[in-house]
Image (spheres, coloured by chain):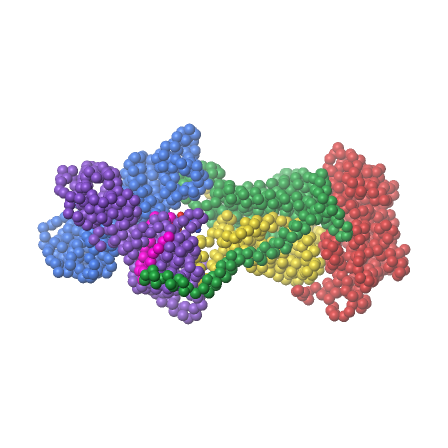
Chain colours: A purple, B blue, C green, D red, E yellow
Amino acid sequence: MAEIRLKNVSKIFKDEKVVKDIDITIKDGSFTVIVGPSGCGKSTTLRMIAGLERQTSGEIWIGDDCVNDTEPGKRNIAMVFQNYALYPTMTVRGNIEFGLVNKKIPKEEREKLIQDISEIVGLTEYLDQKPQNLSGGQRQRVALARAMVKKPKVFILDEPLSNLDAKLRGQMRIELIQLHKKLGTTFVYVTHDQVEAMSMGDEIIVLNKGTVQQMDSPMNVYHNPENVFTAEFIGTPAMNIFAYEKVKKHLPPLIGNVGFVGFRPEHALLERMENGSGSMFLRLASKIITMETLGAETIYTVENAAGKMNIKSFIEPFDNIQEITVAIPYEKLYYFDEQGKRNHGAVMERLEPVLVGGAKA
Amino acid sequence: MAEIRLKNVSKIFKDEKVVKDIDITIKDGSFTVIVGPSGCGKSTTLRMIAGLERQTSGEIWIGDDCVNDTEPGKRNIAMVFQNYALYPTMTVRGNIEFGLVNKKIPKEEREKLIQDISEIVGLTEYLDQKPQNLSGGQRQRVALARAMVKKPKVFILDEPLSNLDAKLRGQMRIELIQLHKKLGTTFVYVTHDQVEAMSMGDEIIVLNKGTVQQMDSPMNVYHNPENVFTAEFIGTPAMNIFAYEKVKKHLPPLIGNVGFVGFRPEHALLERMENGSGSMFLRLASKIITMETLGAETIYTVENAAGKMNIKSFIEPFDNIQEITVAIPYEKLYYFDEQGKRNHGAVMERLEPVLVGGAKA
Amino acid sequence: MTRSSANPMTEVMPRPKVRNNVRSWTRSSVRPYVMIAPAILVFSLFFIYPIGYMIYLSVLDWNFVSPVKDFIGLANFKGLFQEQKFLEVMKNTFMYTTLTVSLTIVISLLISLWLNKQGKVYAFVQGALFSPHIISLVSISMLWMWLMDSNYGLLNWFLNLFGISNVPWLTSPSTSLLSLVIVAVWKGIGFNALIFIAGLQSIPKDIYEAAELDGTSKVRTFFKITLPMLSPTLFFLTIIGIINSFQVFETIAIMTQGGPLNSTNTFVFYIYEYSFRFFKIGFASAAGVVLLVIISLMTIVYFNILSRRVHYQ
Amino acid sequence: ACQSGENEENNGNQAEASDNRIEITYWYAFGDKIGENNENLVKMFNESQDKIRVKAEFQGNYQDLHSKTQAAFAAKNAPEVTLNEIASIGVFAKSGMTEDLTPFIERDKVDMDDFIPGLMGNSYVDGKLYGLPYLRSTPILYLNATMLEEAGLDPTGPKNWKEFEEYARALTKEGERVGMSLPVDIWFYEGLVAQSGGQMISDDGKKAEFNGPAGVEALEFWKKLSDEGVITFQGGEGGADVALQDFANERSGMRFNSTAGLSQMLMLAEEQGFELNAAFMPANDSYGVPTGGANLVMTAGLEQEKKEAAWEFIKWMTAKEQTIYASSYTGYLPSRLSAVESDEMKKLYEEKPQFKVAVDQLEYARPRPMEQAYPEIAMILADEIARTMLEKDLKPQDALDKAAEEANNLLN
Amino acid sequence: MKASTIIKVINGIGLLLVVCIFALPFVWMISTSFKSLGETLTFPPKWIPNQLLWENFAKAWNSGPFLTYITNSIIVSISILILQFATIIPAAYAFARYRFKGNRFFFGLTMITLMIPTQLIFLPVYLQMSKWGLLDTLWALILPFASSAFGIFLLRQTFKQVPEELLEAARLDGASEWKIIFKIMVPMAKPTLVTFGLFSFITHWNDYFWPLVMTTSDVARTLPLGITMLREVEGGAAWNIIMAGNMMLVLPILIVFFFAQRQIIQAFVYTGVK
Ligand SMILES: Nc1ncnc2c1ncn2[C@@H]1O[C@H](COP(=O)(O)OP(=O)(O)OP(=O)(O)O)[C@@H](O)[C@H]1O
Ligand SMILES: Nc1ncnc2c1ncn2[C@@H]1O[C@H](COP(=O)(O)OP(=O)(O)OP(=O)(O)O)[C@@H](O)[C@H]1O
Ligand SMILES: [Mg+2]
Ligand SMILES: [Mg+2]
């Protein structure tokens, strides 16, 4: 168990700086999720922590040691790969045992460790199978067992569930959460999947183009994004963000530098044309373009003065209606400056200053 | 454009009957989605329609023709494969052109068709690239273009989006819906993905072990499942279903043969212990086991007399509360008989007969 | 956990670790050389050095045993290209190579398309097909020499059954090279077919299905899908075939000795004959150098084509 | 490494290992009977005295043997004693790989007159003796006596070219059999040239003479018969095998072949049920044949001790008794007159008179050319002869002139 | 229905024909090895000998120290195999997995040796061997083939296909490079290694030229030399004996092959010879 600190870590591939002066501390025992678009440097960051890639500059600390010059095998880190990277020629037992043998742990102790671990992950009866005879979920468990058995200080997981189908993914997600609780080890977890990020992490790191956009708890990242990137990246459908210019006339004057305004799809109300009145709402006359009904919820794509936007509604879908008014409560609006940075200080002039932004956390 | 009819179609592989007397009509111009667990015969059904596999018995009609003995190339069907099945040795242009050359369409016309199609799918600038130099989404588009350019009567798509990442999948989903609208051709679409099935199809066919469980509109399949299988299969988290026995004492007596009772996770209300009163609700005292916060919604896993169940809530998550009451409105309960078949006639004895089941469609 | 407490720790970092690391770094940069060293040593000692020696000999006039070694510059090369026989040898080598490689590849490709099926019968036939490959060229040469006997060979006996008169096979300059080609093709088909079958099996099935849905005829599917998909295999076999054909020796030494009328004399045999029957080491070495140049050119072309033209998944 | 007891019967050379005998190596060509003969003789030699031990080693055919001797000489580990196919004696001697034996002959007063003179032609280079005849042969004419009789011919065979022509014609039945089936073999051609009174290469070794009248006459004779279809030439490496098969299957009535094959031919004839006769190659102006086989030679540059040992061995191998042994074991010619007259040989000749023919024919034996370039010339010439047979319009004179031109280039 | 049976029959006949074309010569070889000398010369040829002359085999066997030949053949082929594995595995790994200065150069060098006929280089090697006193020993037959360019080529392709994650997983498991090679890479390349092993074994088991040149006595001679010796007779070849000898050469390898055939196809499916 250990804290991980990256101090001004950068990585240059050829001429391209893919990780830019990252400076973060991953708390001991936390479940930290790294998210970000493809190619933003998530894997590279993980691989530098694991020692599979050497950082171009900066320092990496695990617990009290600077591991800059420590071989991967000596860092006391276990990694679970996207496609499991199981040794196909070894049995499940062999896979789990391999790291232990390298550590020169005596046979009896190994046996015991394997026994314990395979009970935990429910693989006891498959110990003598080859990985290719196992299902996706079972392989995933082997990968976990292989990582766990080494009792590492840090677990690193790079999109470990992305190759599983939806059902299994849900199941494994829960197992991983429970595993983390049980072990109390630091987990660093990369994913593409919103739901995974939100539901699993204590802490989310949003990465873009090699720089950290925000590092915070899931709720804060969702409700209190620090910039347009995070706001748009987290949440499905994404937060609707539009130029302030386009809605200026529908809003009371604002104090502060505001370039963009946003709101979450689920915070808007849809009203039939007629009853478009009442204050404290940003009201936009809109046209419904498409409507996706997903059982419990319906997602509308609408078009209005501010452009296209998604609205999420939990009420029965409207059929046959085209014209509609979208109403967003003022307190659910987010303000960003021209650079896309959140402007926490922006307030509406004519009202008593309220805390803008929907977040309470 | 054409209607597809399967008349008593079966398929036996070796000794196993993987498709069992399927008897369905896929409407002309519809977007029909086939869903079902892995190995239930989805691909086999599609492949029989396409002619890549011959049915063991039964007849397949496309439009007014029985195509039992028609070669795949002559059925006027285009197929998009899961892993695209692009010809890796040909350029994008070559891939799109290939079918046209087989049809002996003159060069000039081909050129024009390719030009048009590649504009539609946005591939114009990649026409001279090889598929392996394209991204997943672009490859997918090439596969679509190749299918579209033949102007087929029927489009068959076998999990065409499953290899794409979440973002791209969402985008392609919308593109496909629009494409279907534009072309008006019959689409038969296989997917594993709930969201795809619900949002894209006009019609959903739920398949299990080679038999059709239900064929209906997405809303009906969701709100009005015909049996336990469909009810559990459609919706995430799945409908909560439990033995009638376990909740019998919490419910007014029922008329009709009821084996199982179910409700959708989002239809339950969570109440603090104290205010557990009021009628017309099935109330179960429960313990919260896990809680997944997903931004706009929270999913609770609770345990109570009926077993474990998932509850979906759109209100702010409760923190630090363990004991809770789950309340499900009577009209949101679904009843099934012992065989798992929906019992539409089951009513509560002491109440005026209401239309049971939440569905209105 | 503040920054100020972290900085001193960096400074206290024990140095030995770093030194240890420097050593491991050097080890890792030397490691690939250590790994290739044994192989490269063997190649240098037994292939590269002899080649150098051969180049040295090619500018001498030497009979191999006499103490007199006259340096004569490029005279050997000049002599070589003035010699009718050498030109014939070049021609024979190219003819033999072209015919052998193309016939082997075409026939084995067709056969592999046919035999690319599962089942015991097919496994057996594939095995039978491959069996000539595992048998010593010495045995094969003896066997075929005898099968191709123009009067008493099984082959002519068989042709006679169909009313075809005797073919002179190895005994006439017009058929001798072709006869050697037949032997080489016969021997090579199994190996080639086996690799083609492997290649065919690695082509994804759904591509064929896509083509079927595109209404593609069998022939067109073959030329437009199968063949391009097989291009790496095709290329591999071509290059291996060319190498082997250039090196043909045993069949010639045993079956024809380069005759009749020099019609089956090829590079390697010619070189061997000149150095050991006619004691013209310098001359033979010059021919060896010419062969080496051709081979090197082929190697370069091979790598360039490989990296450019051939399709790889 | 891994010697097993298996080969003790073949190798007499691994007896008591650590005495102070002088070890020398002897390389020979050919296996089967010939190989056995070599091994047996060496064993006998090793047992006959206690100063020298010879190791006999098989090296393939003559070509292999020569190549390897040459390589071994360059690597300075050549065997002390080896065989030179007689046409190669000159090459080896002139390039300094073999030792002049003259001093030993003179010192030990070896009776050179006892060697059959016909066999000695190829033993001298520039007047010095470089080898002593060992397993030697000549081509002879094999006859299917049964067939000859059926055709109303004298089973003792044709005596001269004219008769040969008649025989060939008489034996030929179109599509069924021919008079003679033979490979394109310079050895036989050398015979025909000799019979016509010519020679292959001029005495000074500087000029080809086979395109002179004798050579042309020989080739014209062959071409005439070949064109007429009464003799057929078998091209290619397998030609000799085909000729043999033709003869065995009675598809030809006559055959030129080495005396070395006589035992095998007798066996075959018996199995095929015909009587085999042997005769001189027919005469033109006179009889005349080349000889074949190999001479024993000593490699050059040996230490004195080894030299002596090698000489002892060569002397012993070519002595009368051993000649008799080798001749009767292999069917090769005895090389000494005294051997021919010995009782053992006489007895053999009585039983199998065919063997005598070859010995008698030696009276007309000619040396083979020994120029360094001769192997190459022989090949060129063989090609031209084969071409003459194939191309109807090619004049023998032109073909031979062409070959001679190339040969002259090589000779100078 | 009928058309398909006809096709089946034609297919069957075709298969039979293929087997005949490729296997009949061996049947012929077997048949001949039992014939008498006269029978080998008869025309038209006989398929079944009048009587089975087992003594042909005895004769072939007794014509030389065949036990020595066989032992030598086995020692040479197997030693070459072992040495080749020992040298090509690390080399192929380095070529496939490391970037180092001269990578392309050394690989090019390796590929050139693939194309050099042994006839071109044996002379200097012979002289070297002689200098080292290794002529006429098994070393002279083994050492020059202690590595194989073809093997490195094939194996490199296979190693390249092993996903990088696997190696990283092993590194994180604390495995050394050598351990990675022998515990991860080699087992994964097993079909390729088996195939290469078989080819190498066939090549050196059958090799005629090299042993002919490098050996001068039976001590170090191999089976093919023993067999050709049967043919080197001035008078005329005895085909029955020769074929009997060849049978000894061919049979072991034929047996090995029939067991390894599946593996070979697999190996090429995996490497795709890419
Ligand atoms: N070994 C390498 N050599 C050169 N560039 C590399 C290498 N590895 C990664 N990159 C580049 O570095 C950038 C970041 O890659 P990285 O794999 O960290 O992205 P990622 O965030 O993990 O993306 P994904 O979500 O697709 O896995 C990419 O642009 C990639 O092309
Ligand atoms: N060619 C075949 N030979 C034998 N069995 C087959 C073949 N193709 C499919 N099957 C079997 O038929 C059943 C149905 O397969 P099918 O591919 O139609 O399932 P699916 O619903 O498409 O599954 P998935 O969602 O995994 O793609 C499976 O049990 C499968 O093993
Ligand atoms: Mg990544
Ligand atoms: Mg499927």
E3 part of magenta stretch: no
**Residue C61 in picture, x, y percent from top left:** 74, 47
Residue at 79% from the left image edge and 51% from the top image edge: D95
Does C265 sit left or right of A71 as displayed?
right
Q: Is residue D108 left or right of residue C22?
A: right
Tally of numbered tags: 0
Q: Nearer the viewer, residue C156 or E242?
A: E242
Residue D324 in picture, x, y percent from top left: 83, 59
B285 relative to B6, above or below:
below
Image quadrant for the N terminus of chain A?
Answer: bottom left
Q: Residue at x 28, y 55 (%)?
A: A216
Residue C120 in view of the camera: no
Q: Does the segment drawn in magenta span residue A30?
A: yes
Q: Quadrant of residue B338?
A: bottom left
* Quarter in which the C terminus of chain A is drawn: bottom left
Residue B322 rendering spot, x and y as whole percentages: 20, 61
Question: Relative to the observer, which residue lies in front, A177 or E204?
Answer: A177
Position of residue A95 measured from the top left corner of the image (x, y, whole percent): 42, 61
Q: Which residue occupies 80% across, 68% down?
A: D50
Vertical placement of C31 versus A337: above or below?
A: below
In screen coordinates, is B147 left or right of C231? left
Q: Is residue E113 left or right of residue D299?
A: left
Residue drawn at (64%, 58%), measured in percent from left and top?
Answer: E141
Instruction: Provide the residue span drawn in magenta.
Output: A21-41
User: Is any atom of residue A334 visible in this view?
Assistant: yes
